Image (cartoon, rainbow, N blue to C red):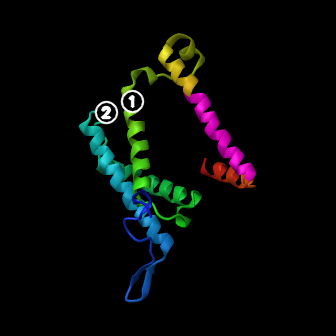
Amino acid sequence: ESLLHKNWLPDGPLEYRNVILLETAGVKFFKFLIWTVIGIVLMHYLVEVVDWERDEKYTLTDMILYDGNIIVLDMLVFFVMSRLYRQQGIDTLSWVLTAWLSTVCTSWETNFKFLQVSVSLYQMHCVWSWKVWVFGIIMIPLVGLIVWYHISYSIQHDLLVRKGMELVMCI
């Protein structure tokens, strides 16, 4: 097993004196919960240190008090809908690096001032710079290609209806 795909902690079940305290799926969910919370805390401080755009009055305490239940519910839906309980686990280097990279990219994009526009006819006609148009010309086909591959895969493996239902349920 490669370093990228090796679990840092066992997936479960959690036992004490031959008594199962938590089944494998529960262990995987709690690992997902713990690693996600660690990622949120680290990202909160990274955004502060590098001075990316943020609400300076929104503290970690505020996040826990006002958004904690929503975050956990979103995590539960993601865990079930993406079938993480069937997968090897989320405490692998490949999973953590991918999650960290996507989090950093979404926070870092606020530094690109030319992307601080909306998609409306007025904005497109009067405000968008050539950089936004180039970004759109590159990203729209790329996203379209990714969607096409997902749909093609779903059709080939007879999963289109199931994947469509999952998408509707997540929205």
149 left or right of 88?
A: right
| For marks 2 and 1 on the same chain, the one whose residue lies earlier in the sequence | 2
Q: Position of residue 113 (x, y in %)?
A: 39, 22
Where disc 1 sits, the SS reads helix
What's drawn in magenta, residue-wise? 139-156
Amino acid, disc 2: Trp
Q: Residue at x 24, y 38 (%)?
A: 49
Amino acid, disc 1: Thr
Quadrant for the N terminus, please.
bottom left
| Residue lying furthest top | 126
Residue 110: image tag = 1
Q: Residue at x 42, y 56 (%)?
A: 4
163 left or right of 104?
A: right
Residue 52: image tag = 2
Q: Per the image, is 138 magenta? A: no
Q: Position of residue 63 (x, y in %)?
A: 35, 49
Does residue 13 lie above or below 56 as drawn? below
Q: Residue at x 75, y 55 (%)?
A: 158
Does residue 161 lie above or below 27 as drawn? above
Q: What distance separates the C-alpha of mark 2 from that of mark 1?
A: 7 Å
Q: Position of residue 39 (x, y in %)?
A: 35, 51
Looking at this view, is 132 or 22 the one in front?
132
The answer to whether residue 71 of the structure is visible from this angle is: yes
Marks 2 and 1: CB-CB under 8 Å?
yes
